[in-house]
Image: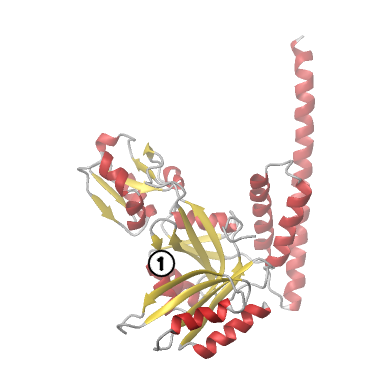
């Protein structure tokens, strides 16, 4: 009787095994096709990465899926497949703020999947230098946080190094208080990067009022310190828990929900147009009344959507500032190209930082 009850279950399981075998066979065939495309592109000296083609694939899959398979899961699965196939054409090295298990590491994996070679660095500036000097193909750096604002070390590095923005990624940030034992009574010191500590300051003040906090280079460094010294707790990512074999004292200690960090991918050359793009510029204004208004008017007259503007002082030149601006559109779009030419004529300094595909979860992504 038991065997009869098991028969329908075994039948479905056998069907799943057959489907899995078919999926594996098709994945292998897709990988072979990607390698063939890579060889054809090499003959024509064409870029391996085609953002427009990838967007078209995702648009078609989303349309054909008709929401039968969970959309976010479908995207994650095919993103990993597409990235793995693309990187089979040419393996790449990606620098991030290390050590392992930082939020920068998480953002890099979210962008490239598991197929890239990830290289931890000690500082954000090192990432820029490594990309500029060709030691790695790409780097990923935090640019702004929805609560704490801009990451000034990244902005300042753009003013020092000749790199271009090649992409962006938005990472929801959840902070965990972790240590070796999982016991809050063992904590004598809390360590983390300055931004996570700032984003959790109210929780820490309320729940650990007599425990000092210390800034370190990254959340990964903090997690490593907590693993080595059992009196230390770290504010760190979920990946750090597994990487450094730590225990969770409390999950989600950030003071505000909806905490998100925007990361940008930097490289030597921006990608081709995808159809849903953003352009970033670095501008210096003439020393005259109304200079900023004149600059913004150039964009407004052409109906260019300005999504962000940020000023940073020029080091060693008191009273002088450069402006970072983000626009919707690609530099090859007629209206963006025309506006950029006009800005070059009217500004004391102009640099195109790159045009790149909008992140899928960007608020400005149509």
Where is residue 288 shown, x and y percent of the image?
40, 89
**Residue under pointer 1:** 124
Q: Looking at the image, which residue sits at the far left?
A: 210
User: Which of the 4 quarters of the picture holds residue 275?
Assistant: bottom right
In depth, the one of 125 and 174 nearer the eye is 174
Residue 228 shows up from this direction: no
What residue is shown at x 77% (from left), y 71% (from top)?
40
In depth, the one of 188 and 151 nearer the eye is 151
Q: How many marks?
A: 1
User: Which of the 4 quarters of the picture holds residue 29?
Assistant: bottom right
Q: Secondary structure at mark 1?
A: helix
Q: Is residue 126 left or right of residue 94?
A: left
What residue is shown at x 22% (from left), y 48% (from top)?
212
In depth, the one of 130 and 70 nearer the eye is 70
Label 1 CA crowd tier, 10 Å (few <14, some 14–19, many 20+): many
In depth, the one of 350 and 154 nearer the eye is 350
Q: Is residue 41 left or right of residue 114?
A: right
Way the structure is coloured: secondary structure
On screen, 9 above or below 180?
above
On screen, 282 above or below 119?
below
Where is residue 111 shown, x and y percent of the image?
57, 58
What residue is shown at x 43% (from left), y 71% (from top)?
310
Q: Is residue 194 left or right of residue 24?
A: left
On screen, 363 above or below 335?
above
Image quadrant for the N terminus?
top right
């Amino acid at each position: 009787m038991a065997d009869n009850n098991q028969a329908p279950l075994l039948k479905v399981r056998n069907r799943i095994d057959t489907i899995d075998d078919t999926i594996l066979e098709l994945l292998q065939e897709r990988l072979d096709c990607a390698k063939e495309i890579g060889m054809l592109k090499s003959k024509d000296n064409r870029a391996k990465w085609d953002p427009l083609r990838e967007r078209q694939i995702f648009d078609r899959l989303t349309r054909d899926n008709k929401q039968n398979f969970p959309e976010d899961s479908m995207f994650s699965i095919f993103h990993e497949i597409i990235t793995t196939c693309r990187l089979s054409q040419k393996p790449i090295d990606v620098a991030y703020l290390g050590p392992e298990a930082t939020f920068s590491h998480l953002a890099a994996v979210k962008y490239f999947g598991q197929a890239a070679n990830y290289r931890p660095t000690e500082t954000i500036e090192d990432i820029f230098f490594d990309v500029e000097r060709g030691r790695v193909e790409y780097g990923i750096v935090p640019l702004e946080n929805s609560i704490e604002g801009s990451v000034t070390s990244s902005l300042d590095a753009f003013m020092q190094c000749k790199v271009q923005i090649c992409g962006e990624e938005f990472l929801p940030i959840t902070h965990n208080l972790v240590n070796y034992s999982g016991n809050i009574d063992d904590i004598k010191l809390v360590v983390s990067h300055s931004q996570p500590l700032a984003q959790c300051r109210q929780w820490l003040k309320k729940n650990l009022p007599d425990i000092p906090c210390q800034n370190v280079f990254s959340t990964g460094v903090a997690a490593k310190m907590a693993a080595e010294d059992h009196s230390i707790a770290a504010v760190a990512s979920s990946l750090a828990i597994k990487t450094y074999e730590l225990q969770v004292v409390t999950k989600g200690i950030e003071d505000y929900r909806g905490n998100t960090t925007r990361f940008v991918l930097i490289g030597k050359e921006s990608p081709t147009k995808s159809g849903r793009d953003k352009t970033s510029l670095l501008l210096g204004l003439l020393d005259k009344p109304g200079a900023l208004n004149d600059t913004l008017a150039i964009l407004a007259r052409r109906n260019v959507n300005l999504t962000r503007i940020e000023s940073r002082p020029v080091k060693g030149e008191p009273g002088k500032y450069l402006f970072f601006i983000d626009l919707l559109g690609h530099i090859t779009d007629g209206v963006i190209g025309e506006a950029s030419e006009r800005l070059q004529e009217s500004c004391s300094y102009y640099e195109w930082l790159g045009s790149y595909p909008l992140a899928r979860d960007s608020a400005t992504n149509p």
